[in-house]
């Protein structure tokens, strides 16, 4: 395998000049740059990435730490991050921390020195202090933060507002016994959505009933299992907001097996608007979040942080959430039908 000295000798330039070419230095003329690259291509030479990063203090890679990598939610989010990163000449290193603080900190430490900055989704309230210790001065942008993130730029989803929109819609359809199946107790998204659920009930003058609040884990099986609990409540609820679309999908299956019709006997709503939601029978009322744009914003913000001056004031941004009305709650019309499909959004961001 050819090395940098072979390229320099063949091109008739110094080793330093070859190094400048591959480090995109402006000190090299276009003619010399093209000559060196032509020779390197002919000799099948490419600079060692580790050595190059030691010289330039840049890896041209960004790290992404997520609580999980399974399902459409995370695939759409990663797609948005990747599209934005590649447009700026960066590659991704992606890891799942499995929503565990110890795993998250270990992943952060393993990526330091390998990437130029980190996008982290930290869905648990107890992660903040440990993350600060692990990151040091490393550029970081946090997705879906809770408390204790005052020193980093953050981007959140409007969880509370989205959940409130669903409950208001259900109330407008005549429902008064409205349940919710949340995500895990310590999950930030889950807690913000239940706050929105309670606020909308209070706004409608509906008394808070703790037995109508069940805990799930954001998976289809937990939504399926929750239905048996919901149907055992007296008086039985007539509608439920599920903490995400996966749980709502599981619940719709369980309701069908129980001989109940959606929405005639029980109205169902979800959150996130994954691609599958619009193709269910009936199509699922849900809360739309543009996950591709969510991921892209995180990258743009991280690159600003990375290149910004020390002491810049952290910014905290909230990405809007929009109710998409479909048939699973009993609406006669389908305003969500005109909403961009996931394939449309992929073309838009490509």
Image (cartoon, rainbow, N blue to C red):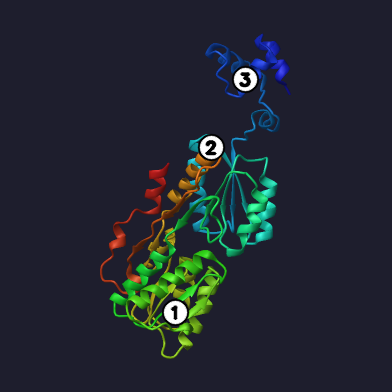
How would you rate the neighbour count of disc 1 (Cα within 10 Å): few for under 14, some for 14-19, many for 20 or more? some
Residue tagged 2: 309
- Circle 2 — which element? loop
Q: What is the spatial separation of the Cα atoms under label 3 and label 2, in whole angstroms?
A: 26 Å
The structure residue drawn at horizontal position 41% and vertical position 90%, both measured from the top left corner, is 235
Quadrant where the C terminus sits is top left
Residue tagged 3: 20
How would you rate the neighbour count of disc 2 (Cα within 10 Å): few for under 14, some for 14-19, many for 20 or more? few
Question: Given this view, does label 3 or label 1 mark the residue nearer the observer?
Answer: 3
- Measuring from the top left, give residue 198's x and y in whole percent: 41, 75
Residue tagged 1: 255
- Measuring from the top left, give residue 182's x and y in whole percent: 50, 72
Horizontal placement of 187 versus 273: left or right?
Answer: right
Q: Which mark is residue 110?
A: none
The structure residue drawn at horizontal position 48% and vertical position 88%, both measured from the top left corner, is 232
Q: What is the spatial separation of the Cα atoms under label 1 and label 2, in whole angstroms?
A: 55 Å
- Measuring from the top left, give residue 4's x and y in whole percent: 70, 20
Q: Earlier in the sequence, mark 3 or mark 1?
A: 3
Where, by quadrant of the figure, is residue 209 drawn? bottom left
Image height of 80 relative to 329, above or below: above
Horizontal placement of 264 versus 40: left or right?
Answer: left
- Circle 1 — which element? helix
Q: Is residue 282 visible?
A: no
Q: Earlier in the sequence, mark 3 or mark 2?
A: 3
């Amino acid at each position: 395998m050819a090395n940098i000295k072979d390229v320099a000798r063949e091109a008739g330039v110094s080793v330093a000049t070859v190094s400048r070419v591959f480090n995109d230095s402006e000190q090299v003329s276009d003619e010399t740059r093209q000559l060196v690259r032509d020779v390197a291509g002919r000799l099948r030479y490419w600079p060692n990435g580790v050595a190059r990063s030691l010289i330039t203090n840049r890896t041209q890679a960004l790290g992404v730490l997520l609580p999980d990598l399974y399902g459409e939610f995370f695939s759409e989010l990663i797609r948005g991050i990747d599209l934005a990163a590649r447009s700026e000449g960066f590659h991704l290193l992606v890891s799942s921390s499995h929503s565990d603080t110890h795993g998250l900190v270990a992943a952060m430490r393993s990526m330091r020195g390998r990437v130029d900055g980190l996008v982290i989704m930290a869905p648990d309230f107890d992660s903040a202090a440990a993350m600060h210790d692990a990151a040091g001065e490393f550029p970081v942008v946090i997705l879906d933060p809770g408390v204790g993130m005052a020193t980093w730029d953050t981007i959140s989803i409007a969880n509370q507002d989205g959940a409130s929109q669903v409950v208001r819609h259900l109330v407008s359809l005549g429902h008064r016994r409205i349940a919710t199946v949340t995500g895990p107790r310590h999950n930030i998204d889950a807690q913000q959505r239940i706050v929105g659920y309670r606020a909308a009930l209070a706004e409608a003058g509906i008394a808070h009933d703790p037995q109508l609040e069940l805990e799930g884990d954001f998976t289809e099986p937990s939504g399926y299992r929750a239905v048996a609990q919901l149907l055992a409540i007296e008086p039985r609820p007539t509608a439920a907001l599920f903490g995400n679309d996966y749980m709502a999908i599981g619940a719709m299956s369980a309701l069908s097996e129980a001989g109940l019709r959606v929405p005639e006997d029980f109205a169902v709503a979800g959150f996130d608007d994954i691609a599958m939601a619009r193709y269910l029978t009936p199509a699922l009322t849900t809360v739309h979040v543009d996950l591709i744009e969510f991921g892209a914003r995180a990258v743009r913000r991280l690159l600003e942080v990375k290149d910004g001056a020390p002491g810049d004031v952290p910014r905290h941004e909230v990405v809007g959430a929009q109710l998409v009305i479909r048939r699973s709650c009993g609406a006669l019309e389908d305003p969500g039908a005109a909403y961009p499909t996931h394939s449309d959004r992929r073309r838009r961001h490509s």
